[in-house]
Image: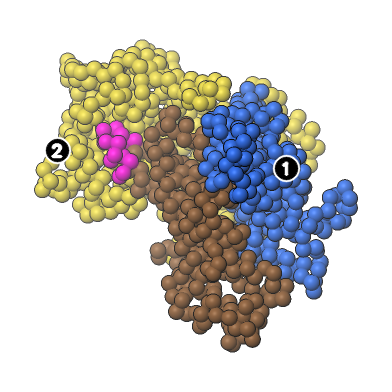
Chain colours: A yellow, B blue, C brown
């Protein structure tokens, strides 16, 4: 008889009881992970993927009601285990790696002690012995000076180092199963790549079974053997990675795959006239953050100056979409704030035939012609104003539409972002994240701008919504001839949308190129490292989808 | 924690004291009836008044009087109480010692009671213990000190019960038992109000900590619940608790005024009321400055304790 | 409002405040006796059918005195808070909106004033102005101003960096529009919550001043003064101090509970 799978969930149904009645989180879920295998569990927010992880770890909130089914670890039923028995299983036989190492590590305890405490708990080691073992575990995760890292507090380590500590902790007791909950989402591109490589190596070495939870189908396809797609608490499709991508059986899976940004599927608006004069020209723009307030200086506080941007020069042509990519802290958002007139700067911003030497120099015509859309749809709309008021503001401010035509124009704007006209009477909290972001886009385009700055506009949205918003943006851009400064950390997305791409690194512009030349040898080494770090969905290589738009 | 940081904090305290001194000096300046009238009484002749005003420097410009006063304080000369005809430093000094005994007793009691209660409420959230502590806390924060004090007196010091003396002071040097008996009700009054407030704050901090990602991570490592609370939750909710206690020193300093008056405790509060009734300006000024200094120093002390408890806090 | 009724402490607070409101609005009509009328035959009595909450040292009906004193006590708290909040909000919003050295200067001064305990501050001001209800109200209002200013400033600062405010700045909106339409409407929530809780403190400090003889003066039936006047007789009839004392606690608790409930409801993090 073959050994039972390490994790086997069958017919599992979970409700949450709420004041409004029971809400089903998981319905008749079945899946299995064998030894040495990685199962990717892919779903959008609210799909139930995290509830399943809690159910496996037997860490359910008080209002959870299990309606039936079984959860087996190497053939043993977990649902009937006592709380004390579960404590012996957690951390020893099932471990978990969390999304954000900066919140999942205790800020007041040294990293080494947080790692060693599992060994003390489950292996019965003495603390000194456990710390010794901990060093060895850290060394295995590729940390150069493990003894020193053991003594550090979380805030003294980088995000990647912290996640290595969390991973070392998870592997510490040689568990049978590890649950990964989006372990790279909070990390930068290059760090995320290193963590994925580490995961692959440790899995090879230990033969652990892994359930890898993610919203990112492209990423999961790179590291998982099989994929289960979950939607509305149900597993809609399950199978080997290549099969799912090549021949998805369900509409939902198909939509999810279509939403994965792929460099070879171009969505960009028609390219700008290469001979046209620049619309926006940054010349030697620098930004310094920090510098203590007057009174603090008086008492001897040393001003801590951080360079947000250093001597950046670039141009955007009319109708062009210029992508700006970089890791966090690269200065890409600083650039957006400068152009939007929110950040004081040194250097010169040229717009059409005028030059501006400082934030205060931006005049009304400039501010109308340059609009910004922010990352967080929740924060960018005033919660006390109705959609109607939000959209009418630029119209009134710039005197674009006579008062009598106001309502009609608002309806047009809502239609342009594919929202029903009756949304005009709603408040932002009555809209979903994607709908809010559409309103923010409509507000930007209401000003009839020449340039729209998009600062990570898709990054807080679900995958399928991301794709819709990106498409909408390009469509509006093509229709109105507006140029766009598109700031993002998503390389695949920017390669779909942008005509040219600027790469920022530690405040400096290190590379600027036509999107078609992304993979040529002329690229800066940093650009090449970034491109190499980003998982490319497999179907793109195995079964190229028909090209749309212009050839890459 | 750098010396430069400490220096900067002490500098900020000096700024606070300058503002307080200006405020209190301004207030006492506009008090009806100046010091000469206070000393000589209403029936003094204009000549007598003028002579005394000259001797006290009251005929000089306001700013000169301010700098004289501040200079005197810095030189250790706090002036003379107009009513008691004793050096202010001596009068206030004795009162400070007595008030400190009361305040420290109350603070120790609060720390020993409020923090465990708040944590218990957070750990047993939603249970009877939590509700009970919450209810007591709400009632406690809604009772002014004079009501609490009066009710404690009625029920614990009345002639039929007489568990505690109704007021007065015995120095701990004289008799520890006597001191404890006399301090119990005034300290208890102050502690009750603060306990209510601090327990609520600690509960809310601890609730946040217990709901944090790192506590969840600790539980999912299979650590026993007691280990999770002792190692992961407690240390992280102590720092905010210390911050709340230091803020409550402000309440404490206000509460002491009423409580000392009710229990006839010979401290700063009682002296202040006496000085206010008699318009004894040098004493009023001195007490206000002392209370502000104590409050500012307690805030600094709490920041130092927090820095010791939380490795993320590094003052530079 | 509907959300408030689903919030148990909010319901408790609303019930307590309703009781207080009835006493304030209808107190004089609900009182069975003249609050100043002596009943020499019935001095220092416990509750009875004739005197629902007992009588004081002159045989005055405690329930009637309580009902008449509600206005003096509660309106004092409301009035002092209103003035303090208005002044504090004005200063705090100015500091928060202006920024720069104006903000630094205002904050230093506020820090200095905050180092003086509220009650001490109020005592000093009452001493200058002389005892009396209006003086005491002004004193409490002044004592509240620095704290309110700090809270208003913090509310403004946290909203100033919201993206919708940044969007308005980027659009080139006037300062008046940004402050009046984008910042203030969203800063009002925290200020109202704080103000509600402050009413409880104002009632307590007002009663304390009355108790110390520096606030309401006889023959007022202000609750703190009632406690002070009856203190000598508290061992013979505890009700003379317990009745007004508990009344103060009920009023203060009502505002506390209501304010906490408001905070929970207005706080988007706690909203589902």
- Whether residue C112 is in magenta: the answer is no
Q: Which residue is mark 1?
A: B85
Residue A531 appears in the picture as rendered: no
Residue displayed at 48% across by 24% down: A294
Q: Which mark is residue A400?
A: 2
Mark 1 crowd level (few <14, some 14–19, many ≥20, 10 Å Cα): few
Q: How far across and down, in percent of the image, does residue A425 sit? A: 24, 54
**The C terminus of chain A lies in quadrant:** top left
> At 33% from the left edge and 50% from the top edge, which residue is drawn?
A384
* Separation of marks 2 and 1 at Cα, in angstroms: 79 Å
Give me the chain letter of mark 1: B
Tell me if residue B76 comes above or below residue C94 in the rendering: above
Give the total of numbered labels.
2
Q: Which quarter of the figure has residue A336?
A: top left
- Viewer-proximal residue, A502 or B91? B91
Circles 2 and 1 in contact, beta carbons < 8 Å: no
Q: Nearer the viewer, residue C65 or A341?
A: C65
Residue A535 x %, y % = 43, 30
């Amino acid at each position: 008889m073959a050994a039972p799978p390490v994790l086997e969930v069958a017919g599992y149904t979970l409700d949450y009881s709420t004041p409004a009645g029971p809400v089903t989180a998981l319905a008749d879920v079945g899946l299995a992970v064998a030894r040495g295998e990685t199962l990717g569990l892919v779903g959008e927010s609210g799909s139930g993927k995290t509830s399943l992880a809690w159910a496996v770890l037997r860490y359910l909130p008080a209002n959870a009601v299990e309606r039936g089914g079984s959860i087996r670890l190497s053939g043993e039923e977990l649902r009937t285990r006592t709380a004390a028995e579960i404590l012996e299983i957690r951390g020893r036989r099932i471990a978990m790696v969390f999304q954000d190492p900066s919140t999942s590590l205790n800020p007041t305890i040294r990293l080494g002690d947080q790692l060693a405490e599992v060994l003390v708990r489950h292996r019965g080691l003495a603390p000194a012995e456990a710390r010794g073992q901990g060093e060895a575990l850290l060394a295995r995760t590729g940390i150069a000076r493990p003894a020193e890292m053991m003594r550090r507090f979380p805030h003294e380590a980088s995000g990647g180092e912290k996640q290595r500590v969390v991973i070392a902790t998870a592997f510490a007791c040689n568990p049978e199963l590890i649950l990964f909950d989006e372990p790279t989402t909070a990390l930068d591109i290059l760090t995320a790549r290193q963590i994925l490589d580490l995961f692959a190596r440790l899995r090879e070495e230990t033969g652990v079974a892994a359930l890898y939870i993610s919203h990112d189908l492209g990423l999961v396809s790179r590291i998982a053997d099989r994929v289960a797609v979950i939607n509305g608490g149900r597993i809609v499709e399950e199978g080997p990675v290549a099969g799912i991508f090549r021949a998805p059986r369900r509409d939902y899976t198909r939509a999810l795959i279509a939403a994965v940004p792929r460099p070879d599927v171009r969505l960009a608006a028609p390219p700008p006239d290469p001979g046209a004069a620049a619309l926006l020209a940054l010349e030697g723009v620098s930004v310094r953050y920090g510098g203590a307030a007057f009174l603090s200086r008086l008492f001897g506080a040393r001003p801590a100056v951080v360079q947000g941007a250093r001597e950046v020069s670039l141009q955007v042509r009319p109708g062009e979409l210029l992508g700006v990519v970089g890791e966090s802290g690269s200065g890409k958002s600083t650039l957006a704030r400068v152009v939007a007139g929110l950040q004081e700067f040194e250097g010169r911003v040229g717009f059409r035939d005028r030059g501006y030497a400082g934030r205060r120099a931006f005049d009304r015509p400039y501010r109308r012609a340059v609009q910004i859309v922010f990352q967080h749809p929740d924060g960018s709309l005033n919660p006390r104003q109705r959609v109607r008021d939000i959209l009418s503001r630029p119209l009134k401010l710039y005197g674009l539409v006579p008062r009598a035509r106001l309502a009609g124009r608002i309806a047009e704007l809502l239609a342009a972002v594919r929202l029903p006209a009756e949304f005009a009477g709603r408040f932002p909290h009555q809209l979903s994240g994607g709908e809010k972001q559409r309103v923010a886009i409509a507000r930007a385009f209401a000003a009839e701008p020449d340039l729209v700055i998009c600062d990570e506009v898709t990054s807080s949205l679900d995958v399928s919504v991301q794709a819709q918003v990106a498409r909408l943006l390009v469509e509006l851009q093509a229709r109105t001839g507006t140029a766009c400064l598109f700031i993002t950390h998503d390389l695949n997305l920017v390669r779909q949308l942008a005509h040219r791409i600027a790469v920022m690194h530690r405040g400096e512009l290190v590379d600027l190129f036509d999107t078609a030349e992304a993979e040529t040898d002329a690229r800066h080494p940093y650009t090449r490292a970034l491109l190499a770090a980003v998982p490319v969905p497999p179907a793109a290589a195995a079964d190229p989808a028909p090209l749309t738009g212009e050839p890459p | 924690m750098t010396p430069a940081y400490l220096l900067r904090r002490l500098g900020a305290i000096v700024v606070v004291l300058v503002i307080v001194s200006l405020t209190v000096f301004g207030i006492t300046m506009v008090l009806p009836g100046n010091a000469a009238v206070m000393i000589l009484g209403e029936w003094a002749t204009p000549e007598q008044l003028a002579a005394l005003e000259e001797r006290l420097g009251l005929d000089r410009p306001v700013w000169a009087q301010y700098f004289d006063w501040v200079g005197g304080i810095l030189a250790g000369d706090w002036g003379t109480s107009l009513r008691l005809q004793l050096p202010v430093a001596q009068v206030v000094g004795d009162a400070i010692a007595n008030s400190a005994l009361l305040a420290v007793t109350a603070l120790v009691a609060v720390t020993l009671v409020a923090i465990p209660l708040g944590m218990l409420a957070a750990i047993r959230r939603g249970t009877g213990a939590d509700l009970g502590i919450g209810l007591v806390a709400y009632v406690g924060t809604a009772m002014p000190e004079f009501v609490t004090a009066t009710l404690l007196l009625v029920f614990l010091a009345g002639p039929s019960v007489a568990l505690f003396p109704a007021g007065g002071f015995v120095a701990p040097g004289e008799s520890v038992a006597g001191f404890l008996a006399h301090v119990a009700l005034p300290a208890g009054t102050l502690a009750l109000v603060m306990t209510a407030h601090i327990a609520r704050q600690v509960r809310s901090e601890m609730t946040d900590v217990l709901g944090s990602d790192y506590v969840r991570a600790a539980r999912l490592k299979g650590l026993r619940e007691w280990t999770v609370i002792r190692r992961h939750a407690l240390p992280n909710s102590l720092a905010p608790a210390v911050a709340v206690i230091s803020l409550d020193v402000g309440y404490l300093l206000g509460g002491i005024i009423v409580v000392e008056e009710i229990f006839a405790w010979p401290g700063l509060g009682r002296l202040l009321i006496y000085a206010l009734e008699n318009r004894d300006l040098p004493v009023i000024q001195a007490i206000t400055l002392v209370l502000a200094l104590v409050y500012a120093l307690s805030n600094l002390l709490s920041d130092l304790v927090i820095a010791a408890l939380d490795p993320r806090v590094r003052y530079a | 409002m509907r959300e408030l009724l689903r919030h148990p402490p909010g319901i408790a607070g609303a019930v307590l405040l309703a009781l207080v409101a009835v006493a304030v609005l209808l107190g004089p009509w609900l009182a069975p006796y003249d609050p100043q009328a002596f009943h020499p035959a019935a001095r220092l009595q416990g509750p009875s059918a004739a005197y629902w909450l007992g009588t004081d040292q002159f045989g005055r009906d405690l329930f009637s005195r309580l009902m008449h004193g509600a206005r003096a006590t509660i309106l004092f708290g409301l009035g002092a808070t209103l003035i303090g909040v208005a002044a504090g909000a004005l200063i705090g919003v100015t500091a928060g909106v202006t920024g720069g050295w104006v903000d630094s200067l205002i904050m230093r001064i506020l820090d200095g004033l905050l180092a003086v305990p509220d009650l001490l501050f109020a005592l000093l001001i009452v001493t200058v102005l002389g005892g009396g209800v209006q003086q005491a109200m002004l004193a409490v209002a002044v004592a509240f101003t620095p704290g309110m200013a700090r809270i208003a400033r913090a509310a403004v600062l946290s909203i100033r960096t919201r993206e919708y405010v940044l969007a308005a700045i980027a659009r080139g909106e006037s300062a008046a529009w940004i402050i009046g339409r984008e910042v203030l409407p969203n800063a009002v929530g925290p200020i109202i919550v704080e103000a509600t809780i402050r009413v409880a403190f104002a009632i307590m400090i007002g009663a304390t001043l009355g108790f110390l003889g520096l606030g309401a003066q006889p023959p007022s039936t202000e609750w703190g003064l009632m406690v002070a006047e009856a203190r000598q007789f508290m061992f013979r009839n505890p009700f003379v101090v317990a009745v007004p004392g508990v009344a103060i606690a009920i009023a203060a608790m009502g505002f506390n509970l209501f304010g906490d409930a408001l905070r929970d409801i207005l706080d988007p993090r706690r909203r589902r």
